[in-house]
């Protein structure tokens, strides 16, 4: 698929052929959807490698988490609970998936991963893809808990790396129907505000292979 570019050392791909079962999702063409997931690691090997200012701020965060894990020290909380905080961890991999038409009623499912220790270069490569191929109102980003985790995390790390985010990442100032984010966790809730369903559990109950 010529429009899905090769980007330096961050290029990983594999192909599979899928039957064309569900082309339409509430009026959204799956060919215009980019599925996104990211992986993060601590910016420093341990809590004690943080500079004095960050370590003090992390300790304040840890105080708010002690009601969850009373037995864990600030150091253990840093290693086990800091992943959700973009201020203390960084992105090392962003994987994306897309569907593309092939002959007849066959879909091609294509994957690509941007990865590496240089977070700025990784984000630049990912943003280049978005700016070039996902820059219209009919394009969407999709993922599990993407609106609360993946997209805010990417934007916060972009800010740290002094990068401008592509417009598709923003929902500020947009009307609900203008937001270009599809969150499978929100879809699974069907309006329920009390529960959280992990992707691992969701795939299990739907008899699907789990990526976790």
Image (cartoon, grey):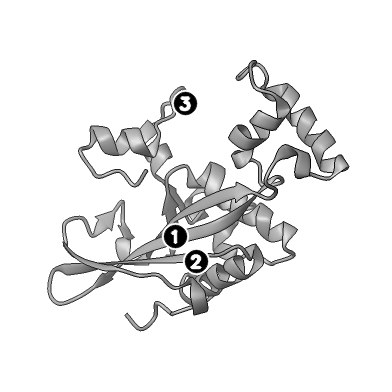
Q: In the rendered image of this protein, does residue 114 appear above or below residue 59? A: below
Disc 2 and disc 1 in contact, CB within 8 angstroms:
yes
Residue 134: give x, y in percent of width and height: 47, 70
Q: Nearer the viewer, residue 175 or 63?
A: 63
Distance from Cα at disc 2 to Cα at disc 1: 6 Å
Q: Quadrant of the N terminus?
A: bottom left
- At label 3, counting other C-alpha atoms closer than 10 Å, the crowd grade (few under 14, some 14-19, many 20 or more) is few
- Going by the image, does 32 lie left or right of 104? right
Q: Quadrant of the C terminus?
A: top left
Marked residue nearer the N-terminal end (2 or 1): 1
Which residue has dot 1 on it?
Answer: 95
Residue at horizontal 54 percent and vertical 73 percent from the top: 131
Residue 175 seen: no
Q: Quadrant of residue 53?
A: top right
Residue 151: give x, y in percent of width and height: 56, 52
Residue 44: give x, y in percent of width and height: 70, 48
Which residue has dot 2 on it?
Answer: 114
- At label 2, counting other C-alpha atoms closer than 10 Å, the crowd grade (few under 14, some 14-19, many 20 or more) is many
Q: In the rendered image of this protein, does residue 129 appear above or below residue 201? A: below
Marked residue nearer the N-terminal end (1 or 3): 1
Q: Quadrant of residue 189?
A: top left
Distance from Cα at disc 1 to Cα at disc 3: 28 Å
Residue 43 seen: yes
Which residue has dot 3 on it?
Answer: 193
């Amino acid at each position: 698929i010529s429009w899905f570019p090769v980007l330096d050392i961050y290029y990983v791909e594999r192909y599979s052929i899928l039957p064309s079962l569900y082309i339409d999702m509430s009026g959204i063409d799956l060919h215009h959807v980019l599925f996104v997931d990211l992986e993060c690691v601590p910016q420093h090997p341990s809590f004690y490698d943080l500079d004095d200012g960050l370590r003090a701020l992390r300790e304040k965060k840890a105080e708010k988490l002690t009601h969850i894990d009373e037995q864990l020290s600030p150091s253990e909380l840093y290693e086990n609970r800091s992943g959700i905080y973009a201020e203390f961890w960084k992105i090392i991999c962003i994987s994306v998936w897309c569907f593309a038409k092939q002959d007849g009623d066959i879909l091609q499912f294509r994957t690509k991963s941007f990865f590496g220790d240089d977070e700025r270069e990784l984000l630049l490569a990912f943003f280049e893809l978005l700016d070039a191929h996902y820059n219209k109102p009919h394009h969407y980003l999709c993922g599990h808990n993407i609106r609360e985790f993946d997209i805010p995390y990417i934007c916060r790390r972009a800010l740290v790396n002094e990068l401008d985010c592509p417009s598709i990442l923003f929902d500020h100032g947009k009307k609900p129907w203008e937001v270009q984010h599809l969150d499978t966790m929100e879809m699974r809730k069907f309006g329920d505000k009390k529960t959280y369903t992990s992707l691992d559990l969701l795939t299990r109950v739907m008899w699907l292979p789990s990526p976790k």
